[in-house]
Image: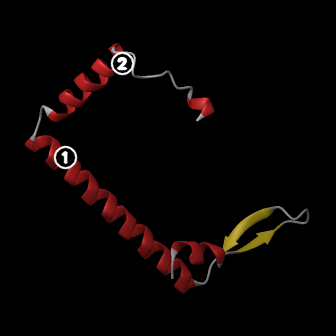
Amino acid sequence: MSLTELVKSVEFLVDAEGNKKAAVLEWSTWQELVTLLEQLDDQESEAEQRWDAAFASSPDLLASWADEALAEHRAGKTQVLNPDQL
């Protein structure tokens, strides 16, 4: 079952005003959700290890990217971004 399907299977307990107060899952659904989250965590760890290895094998790579970005900025090829408007 996909993560989206798991989330859609959640039922909610509501108070007298209809406000959601708790989520209810079948135990098997909970176990599937935990498994999917563990797999995601493993994938993220593997990706971090690949990044670490890439930078360790080429320590000047990040500095090179920074120099390139700074040169583009000085050449007027960049623009100010407002995070609130993204």
Residue 74 spot, x, y in % from top left: 33, 13
Check the image and name the residue furthest to the left: 57
Say which mark, if any, is on residue 73: 2
Residue 5 lies left or right of residue 23; in this view the side is left
Looking at the image, tell me whether mark 1 or mark 2 is earlier in sequence order: 1
Mark 1–mark 2 distance (CA, rounded to whole Å): 27 Å
Mark 2 residue element = helix
The structure residue drawn at horizontal position 65% and vertical position 75%, both measured from the top left corner, is: 8
Check the image and name the residue furthest to the top: 74
Residue 25 spot, x, y in % from top left: 62, 78
- Give the amino acid type for the residue marked by disc 1 in the picture: Asp
Disc 2 crowd, CA 10 A, few/some/many (<14, 14-19, 20+) = few
Which residue in the protein does label 1 denote?
A: 52
Say which mark, if any, is on residue 84: none
In the foreground, 71 or 27: 71
Closest to the camera, between mark 1 and mark 2, is 2
Kindly indicate whether the residue at mark 2 contacts the one at mark 1 (C-beta within 8 angstroms).
no
Disc 1 crowd, CA 10 A, few/some/many (<14, 14-19, 20+) = few
- Give the amino acid type for the residue marked by disc 2 in the picture: His
The structure residue drawn at horizontal position 36% and vertical position 70%, both measured from the top left corner, is: 39
In the foreground, 42 or 84: 84
